[in-house]
Every structure is written in structure tokens, then in C-alpha cells.
Image (cartoon, rainbow, N blue to C red):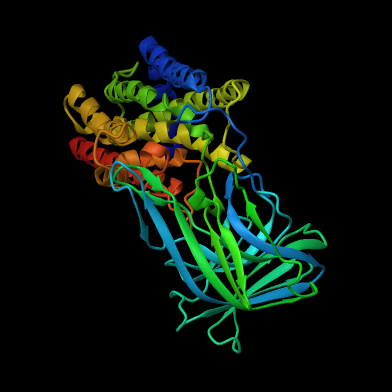
Amino acid sequence: MEPEKTGHDSFAQLLAVEWTTFRKVRGFLIAMAVAALVTVLLGLVVANLITCGPDGRACSTILVGPGGEAVDDRFSFVHQPLAGDGSVTVRVTSLTGLITYPSPKHDQIVSSVVPWAKAGIMIKENTQQGSAYAAVMVTGSHGVRMQYNFLEDMAGNPGGVSAQSPRWLRLTRSGDTLTGYESSDGMQWIRVGMAHLTGLPTTVQVGLFVTSPCNLSTDDDTCRLTQATATFDHVSLTGSGGLDALVSTRIGGHKDDPALSVGSFHKSGETFTVIGSGDIAPGAGGGWPIERFLIGTVIGLLVVIVVAVLFATAERPVRRMHASERRGQILVAKAIVIGLVTFMTQLVAALIVIQLGKRIVLSHGSIILSVSTLTELRVVIGTAALVGVAAVFALALGALFRHRVVAVMVSIALTALPFILAVVDLVPDAWSQWLLRLTPAAGFAIQQSIPVYPQVISLYTPLFGYYPLAPWAGFAVLCGYTVLALGLAVFLLHRRDI
């Protein structure tokens, strides 16, 4: 008599049987190959269509910060050299601004300060754009902040600034360590934050700065030019030999810039007035994110959904089912098979299309936004996992619904369709945000490589590569739906076996 097999061995046999079922259906194998091929080919088509910047303008070099990330670095800087250790202290008594509303809509200039207008003190490696820096500042609507090297932002006390309620700021340097402080009276100081700028040269630039980013309107995707004006007094420098060497530099300026963005500097007695425009922050303008080459993933997913639903009801090579082989166990085995096959094929496809896509775009003279190796791995592996889990979700729906067509349509409606509607901008942005929060399509967030920075106002919408949920949070939503659907299907199949 044949010895009784353990549960573990029995399930291993189920896996082997379901893998045999899958690979013996030639249509399944061809379809999975087609899904991977579509992912690659559509991505390469997109790469070949990219000839320069996203808006078709001439290619230009992206400004990068100390860590190689894309940045924006444009501001008015009143500065002088600081050799070795030292500090700068100021009192800010006002921060005002202007916003332009160009024709044909308004054609006027209004007095207003944008939320992330910045005025304060800075120690910067040099006057080259993108060089290392640390700064303490007052802002239009976000209180006192300490920021450094474009990406880092630390909050101080909230509130604005005025002659009746001035803000004192102090920035000290000790070797590579820069520490920012704030005070309401110039007597009691509170530390805002600390930055370690490794490799900072002995002689740096220290002084006052003002900048003001554009005023973004999400209604018409317009970013209007702005300007900020700040008044400083009680300026004191230690370690730099007084204020006689102060000069004004427009960092990042161009001769063809509008007059409002040029900025200026005026000194009256002990009072300094600095006017500036621009931003000191992370930036991604003019470059392409790596996930742009994965646009074919959603089309490949449509093919995978059909295969998964058909596989859910595929006949096994041996029709007789032993008592220990419950339908629920069989469904789980099918889920593992379809999930692994989809993951592996899409992993190869994603890896190929991103590497080839980058080479093609760079050969055209265009620019790829730099990301860390870990981020690129997360995008590649996450894309494969996204399609693999979506395949299991479709398989579960195939087991739940009696009709294959209904299961396919529901799967597409819940996973691919919300993504298409959001990315192609076929529904209002508010709808897109909720669709990519509440449906399994939230899993596409795993492909986002461009981080969202709270200190940068931008069009954070799916159309521009941003999702309402963080990458792993969005993927978790898809996994949650899949576990729920698979668990429900197993439960219902188990009841049928009783």
C-alpha cells in the first residue's frame, strides 16, 4: 500500500500539477510572452519619441545638487567670504511680495506673499548653482525653517514676521557642522536644526538671501512669476571681519529674465532690503523619470488578467480529485503559479525596458532624472510584483464569478481602468486622487520614482508621475484587495466541498 503523504507533500504536488496545467496550455505561455513583449515594445516606442524636454523645448543640462539630485537654485544673495568658523545673526522685520497675473486673464500685479517665499541667512559653499548650503529663514506661510542641501527641511516656530513681531535668526559654523537658531527677542535662542555638510571648504560664502517661487494655479496649470522683499537689521557677522565686504549676487540669473525676477539690494544705515525671486529646493523640470518607460505595463496587465481568469477554471491533467485536495487548496496553488510566472516574466521585461529606454533617451541628448540604485530596484521589482499580485486578484475574481467575461471586466475595471483614467487625465483630478487611493489601481504607486517634497509646491498628480499614496502604501492597498478576494474565494470553495 502506498504510504499516506503529508499535507506539505500534498500541497507541493498540487503546485506541480497546477504548473503542469499552466505550461501545457500553449495559449497561456504565448499570452504571458506577449504581455512581457508589449511592456518592452511600448516602453521603447516612448523612449524613441523623447527627443528633449517634456514640453518639447531644447535640451539643457539639469542642475544637480550635492547628492546628484535635480534641484532649483535661484535667489538673491548678499554675501561675503567666511574663513573658518563663525556665525551670522540678523533680525527680519518684514516679508512682502508681488504676484503677476499675465494677460489675457488678469494682466496685473498684486501684492501678496506665496507660502514658500523665503528670506533669511545662509552659509553656502560658493556662489555656483547647486553647491552645498545651509540656511535659516522665515517663510510666507510656514514659519521659521532650517533647510540644507535642497532636500532637507526642519521646522521652527510657526507664524509670520512684521515690524511688531520680528524674527531673529542665527546660523553658526563649526567645521562641517552648521546650526540654526531663532529668537523672538534676540536674547533667548531656540535651536531649529543642525546640518553636517561633509567636505565643506575652509572659506565659504555667508550672508542674507531672498527668493520666491512661482505661484502655482492647479486650475489651469499656470505658475505665475512672483517676487519677495525682506527687510533685515541688527546684522552681525563673526569670523568674517565686519560687513564692509558684502556684495550682491543673483544666483542663477539670466540676462533675458523678466525684470520682476532680477532682484536687488539696498542698504540704508543699518537696514538691509533684499528683493529676490526663484527657489532653493528640489526640482525635476526638464528631465524624464525612469517609470515613464513602463507605460506598457498597463497594456500587458490586460493580457495577464485574461490569462489569470482562464487559468482559474482551467482543467487539470487528472480529473479525479482526492479528498485531501480541496478546491480552496487548488486555488491557492493556482495563485502561486500565476503570481510567480507573471512576476518573473514582468521582472525581465521591466529590467530590459528601463535599461534600454535610458540608453535611447540619453543617446537623443535628453535627460533622465537621477535616482538611487535602491529606488530603481524598487521600481523594477515593484512593477513585476504589481502585475503579479494583480494576476492573483484576477484569478480570485475568476473563481468568485460564474462567468469568465464578467470576471475579466470586473478585474479590468478595478485595476487597469482607474489608472488609465487618472494618467490620461480623463477625469477631474479630485476623482483621480480617490480612484488611486481606494481601488486596487493604487498599486501603481509602486512605480513612482520622484519623491514628493512638502517644501515644494508642484502639480502632484498622476498625470505628472505622482500618486496620492506612498509607493509601498499604494502597493499594500492592492495586496489587501487581493488577500480579501482570494480569502473569500477559498472560503466559498471550501463551503462547496462540505
Q: Nearer the viewer, residue 273 or 309?
A: 273
Determine whether, in the image, residue 336 is placed left or right of residue 372.
left
Q: Residue 237: horizontal and vertical position, in percent?
A: 72, 75
* Image point (38%, 62%), residue name: 112
Q: Residue furthest front?
A: 268
Q: Is residue 391 left or right of residue 171?
A: left
Most foreground residue, 246 or 205: 246
Between 351 and 53, the one lying in front of the other is: 53
Residue 7: image location, x then y, percent: 41, 38
Quarter that holds the C terminus: top left
Vertical relation: 287 (above or below) 137: above
**Residue 172 vertical placement versus 306 (above, below):** below
Place residue 63 in its image quadrant.
top right
Residue 479, above or below 126? above
Q: Position of residue 220 (x, y in %)?
A: 31, 42
Q: Is residue 326 among what the camera can see?
A: no
Determine whether, in the image, residue 416 is placed left or right of residue 177. Answer: left
Q: Nearer the viewer, residue 222 or 399?
A: 222
